[in-house]
Amino acid sequence: GQNIDQPTEMTATEGAIVQINCTYQTSGFNGLFWYQQHAGEAPTFLSYNVLDGLEEKGRFSSFLSRSKGYSYLLLKELQMKDSASYLCAVRGASGGSYIPTFGRGTSLIVHP
Amino acid sequence: DTEVTQTPKHLVMGMTNKKSLKCEQHMGHRAMYWYKQKAKKPPELMFVYSYEKLSINESVPSRFSPECPNSSLLNLHLHALQPEDSALYLCASSQGSGSTDTQYFGPGTRLTVL
């Protein structure tokens, strides 16, 4: 099975940088996803990490350490529209299934 | 184009009604998924179709019945639902269901059961 842990809520100021952490335990590992979800809307794919290191994509970066079972999503130059829930999803290899399991999500509140 | 569409956007139904949710993608993806999401909770996997065949059913009650008429369409038939079934129902698709495939989600159907 899989166990995924991320903070429930974070607050940050517009223009600042925020780091959202995700720790996981899984039997087998086949990648970690970050999704953004605004209230009442569908999750939107942000990033995918399968090897250790940092993946940068514009204002968003995602880091993975497989040995530590740890990932973070870094958001720079925060904007009000970044207020959303950020879901960490881990793909294991349980019983031949590669369906990702979602964490509970971190609700990010950006204030002026 | 990474678009998955879902209809309707909102649905209100009584416990004796029969309704269907529809999902469509034209990305040539061969895996499609139904998720249920309650407020402030992560999406919970319900069903997975791979190459138009049901490959995963996560012990979902029989009042939810999935159907995959072709590789682009996925339906979820609803019958005799309970108020606790009220949730956001999300459809997703991916190239396949293998170890390198990314899921893309539709906008969801907000379902309210009275």
Image: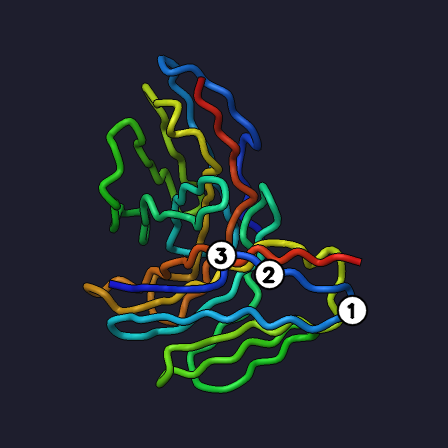
Q: Which residue is mark 3?
A: A105
Image position of B93 with respect to B102: above or below:
above
Location of the C terminus of chain B by quadrant is top left
Between the C-alphas of marks 1 and 3, the distance is 22 Å
Label of residue A10 in the image: 2
Disc 1 on helix, strand or loop? loop
> Label 1: how many residues lie within 10 Å, few (<14), some (14-19) or many (20+)?
some
- The quarter holding residue B36 reads top left
Image position of B16 with respect to A58: above or below:
above
Give amino acid for label 1: Gly
Query: Chain for mark 2?
Result: A
User: Which comes before the other along the chain, label 1 or label 3?
Assistant: 1
Q: Which residue is mark 1?
A: A15
Residue at horizontal 42 percent and vertical 77 percent from the top: A70
Residue at horizontal 61 percent and vertical 74 percent from the top: A74
Instruction: Tell me if residue A44 can be seen.
Output: no
Task: Report the colour scheme.
Answer: rainbow
**Along the horizontal axis of the image, is A13 left or right of B108?**
right
Residue at horizontal 24 percent and vertical 71 percent from the top: A27
Query: Chain for mark 3?
Result: A
Looking at the image, is mark 2 or mark 3 nearer the viewer? 2
Give amino acid for label 2: Met
Q: Position of residue B3 (x, y in %)?
A: 58, 51
Residue at horizontal 46 percent and vertical 64 percent from the top: A6
